Image (cartoon, grey):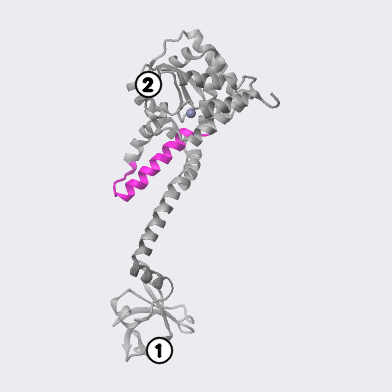
Amino acid sequence: MLGGQWLDGRSTRARRVRLERAGDDRLRIVDLADGAETFWPMAEIEVGARLGATPRVLRRAGHGQIECPDSPELAQWFRRPAGGIEAVADWLERRRLAILGAAAAAALFAFAFLRLGVPWAAERIAVAMPVAVEAEVSRQAVTLLERGHLAPSRLPAARRSALRRRFGQLVQGEPRQADMRLHFARAPGLGANALALPDGRIYLTDELVELAADDDEILAVLAHEAGHHVHRHGMRQAIESSSVLLVVGLAFGDVSGSSLAVALPTVLLTSGYSRGHEREADAYALGLLGRRGISPRAFGRIMRRLAGDDAAPAGAVGYLSTHPPTVERIEAAERAGRGPGE
Ligand SMILES: [Zn+2]
């Protein structure tokens, strides 16, 4: 015996009913209000699939539907060959190879989600990220950097303001230019380097200023960092890496919002940019230098110098060690410097 609610499709009122098996082929429906009995042939009843904790639904064409809680009795009454999705599930259960195939498909889907879905979402989240979050993440990242890597710059004040002036002219009128501020620091542990933080702070090390042969080379590096800021690479990369942590954390049941908030600045500094982001920042830099009348070859020159710079330690934190001066990047800069017809 099983209780349920009968919506007959004619009245909007649900009738409280009791369901019983009547012989082999009929279902007895007893109206609890007046004791009236109705009989449905079992063969004409369509049983809805089990979906978690939702009520089961019995339908008979022209007679409406009865909702009742899931019960083992239903399985007994309506034992019939499985169809549709149930048949597929049944088929899968019987075939180990198919199960392995399904597992592989699920893994592939998860990989595609992390590889394509997460970057897609990260870009949109980064754009919508409140300025306050960018500022807080950047502040914490700088605190981490200052603890281990950055010391006050020893460049003369006049040199610093001259470079700030040229940087200001370089990015004048560029997207997100209002946030960009140039900072100087000495970084014995990092060597010649530069980095952009999500809030628009761009750090340039004394070591890089000293390595460069002229200001155009420094501006080439700053144009690349400006590209990271314009395209929000820092925040996007941090969100992507955190999302991977989040997905892994969910899989192992170990995740909380607070641990994620703590992780973000660290992730920002340790994850580094993807090659795609580097290419995008390079392309932006070469375009910007060209528009400002600075030869993109300056970019190739500083890259070569960085490649030959023994002072740059191999074990620098990821964010700062991810500007490998590759042959590919140098060649791209030299191609851009040649220009059409040259
Ligand atoms: Zn970069």
Q: Which residue is mark 2?
A: 313
Q: CA distance from mark 1 to mark 2?
A: 81 Å
Q: How many neighbours does mark 1 have within 10 angstroms: few (below 14), some (14-19), or many (20 or more)? A: few
**Residue at 35% over, 67% down:** 95
Q: Secondary structure at mark 2?
A: loop
Residue 328 versus residue 124 in the image, above or below: above
Disc 1 marks which amino acid? Answer: Pro
Quadrant of the snapshot with the N terminus: bottom left
Badge number at residue 33: none
**Residue at 58% over, 25% down:** 333
Q: Which residue is mark 1?
A: 41
Q: Left or right? Give the position of 132 relative to 93.
A: right
**Front residue of 260 and 19:** 260
Q: Where's residue 154, x and y in %?
A: 42, 10
**Residue at 62% over, 20% down:** 295
Quadrant of the snapshot with the C terminus: top right
Hey, which quadrant is residue 22 in on the image? Answer: bottom left
Whether label 2 lies within 8 Å of ligand 1 gets the answer no
What residue span does the magenta drawing correspond to?
A: 230-257
- Residue 236 on the magenta span: yes
Q: Where's residue 186, x and y in %?
A: 40, 15
Whether label 1 lies within 8 Å of ligand 1 gets the answer no
Disc 2 marks which amino acid? Answer: Pro
**Residue at 40% over, 20% down:** 312
Q: How many neighbours does mark 2 have within 10 angstroms: few (below 14), some (14-19), or many (20 or more)? A: some
Q: Where's residue 133, x and y in %?
A: 43, 34
Q: Secondary structure at mark 1?
A: strand
